Amino acid sequence: MKCRTCREPAIIDLPRHNANFCAEHFLQLCRRQVAKAIHDHQMFTEADRILVAVSGGKDSLAVWDLLVDLGYRADGLYIALGIGEYSDESRGYAERFAAERGLVLNVVSLREDYGYDVPTAAKATGRVPCSACGMSKRHLFDKAAVDGGYDVVVTGHNLDDEASVLFGNALRWDVEYLARQLPVLPARHGFPRKVKPLIRLTEREMAAWCVVRGIDYIIEECPMAAGNRHLGYKEALNSLEEKSPGTKASYYLGFLDRMAPLLADLAVTGADSVRPCARCGAATGVADEHAVDGEIVCAFCRLVERSAAHAPVSVDLVRKKSRAERRATMEVEAR
Ligand code: Q46
Ligand code: ZN
């Protein structure tokens, strides 16, 4: 097996490129794919201040590493979700990565800063854990970006993630989600832009990037992810990919090129009216707002109120109870 570029021994085969690569030229390919995604979708420039959503897993650490490597100014934000040992371990990986490279990692703890954790929020609100978790993360990333003066929030969603969400949305013909499944979510209502620079790279390529670059990351999945419908979609796409390499990329990137423009009118959400939450000041959409004693209170503040008042709940309890429910009601926007 020889590298397509230099004919030296290869370390990885990439059937979708019909080629093998040595370590150096594999890294070069990854850098080029990220640079192309940033450029094609006008994600950000070197003048922008970037906040990377860091989980301690391979994708978020790889995207942070790639951006710094490409010369961007990027800090990280880790949110301690209080999901038992998984959270403690993943935080360790994120902190070591940042410390070893002299990067700035901001940390927000749901339990210490807001008085709850994901398992307790799931129990207290009757939501599936991923729904309570996703909502907390979205709110806190927005808030951290606004408070810290960042222009853009980066997430580590890769080609497998985006293709599987697209597959799910297309199976249900959920056109509104389809219209908004773009790699750039424009800034609105004072919130920062959100972008996904890894859309041209797969999960396997990101794991390989981490190995070659010496990045240690948490390998275990979140214990709440079991039964997640997207894992099934990923498996289905992987078996198609195996038979016909390149299927995933042409499916998702072809959607962005040829289908998303046709849905553009549906994607316009900037016009919806918003009002500030009386508790935290965050912009609150009409669909999300809720009056408490005559005041507008956002969904996050309501979740905090109910969850912080609830006795702490263990991960195992929520896992057992929600496995069956989750199969039926897994949220589209889990991450
Ligand atoms: S962390 Fe949170 Fe994910 Fe765990 S509870 Fe679900 S959404 S699976 S990315
Ligand atoms: Zn609020």
Image: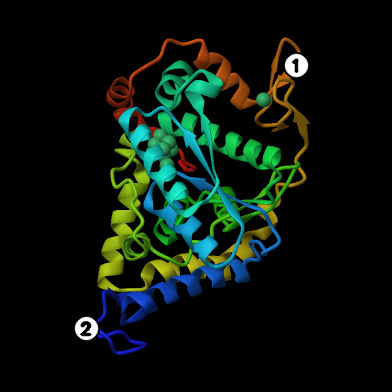
Residue 330 in sight in this render: no
Q: CA distance from mark 1 to mark 2?
A: 66 Å
Residue at x 41%, y 29% (from the top left corner): 129
Residue at x 78%, y 37% (from the top left corner): 273
The amino acid on which the numbered mark 2 sits, given as a three-letter code, is Met
The amino acid on which the numbered mark 1 sits, given as a three-letter code, is Glu
Task: Determine crowd level at label 2: few under 14, some 14-19, many 20+ residues with C-alpha closer than 10 A.
Answer: some
Residue 113 in sight in this render: yes
Residue at x 70%, y 57% (from the top left corner): 265
Query: Which numbered marker is on residue 326?
Result: none
Which numbered mark, 1 or 2, is in the foreground of this view?
2
Q: Quadrant of ligand 1?
A: top left
- Report the number of numbered marks: 2
Residue at x 27%, y 24% (from the top left corner): 320
Marked residue nearer the N-terminal end (1 or 2)? 2
Q: Secondary structure at mark 1?
A: strand
116 vs 132, nearest the viewer:
116
User: Residue 252 location, x and y as percent?
Assistant: 47, 64
Residue linked to disc 2: 1
Is residue 225 positioned above or below 192 on the image? above
Q: Secondary structure at mark 2?
A: loop
As drawn, is 40 to the left or to the right of 27?
Answer: right
- Residue at the bottom extreme? 7
Residue linked to disc 1: 295
Model colouring:
rainbow
45 vs 159, nearest the viewer:
45
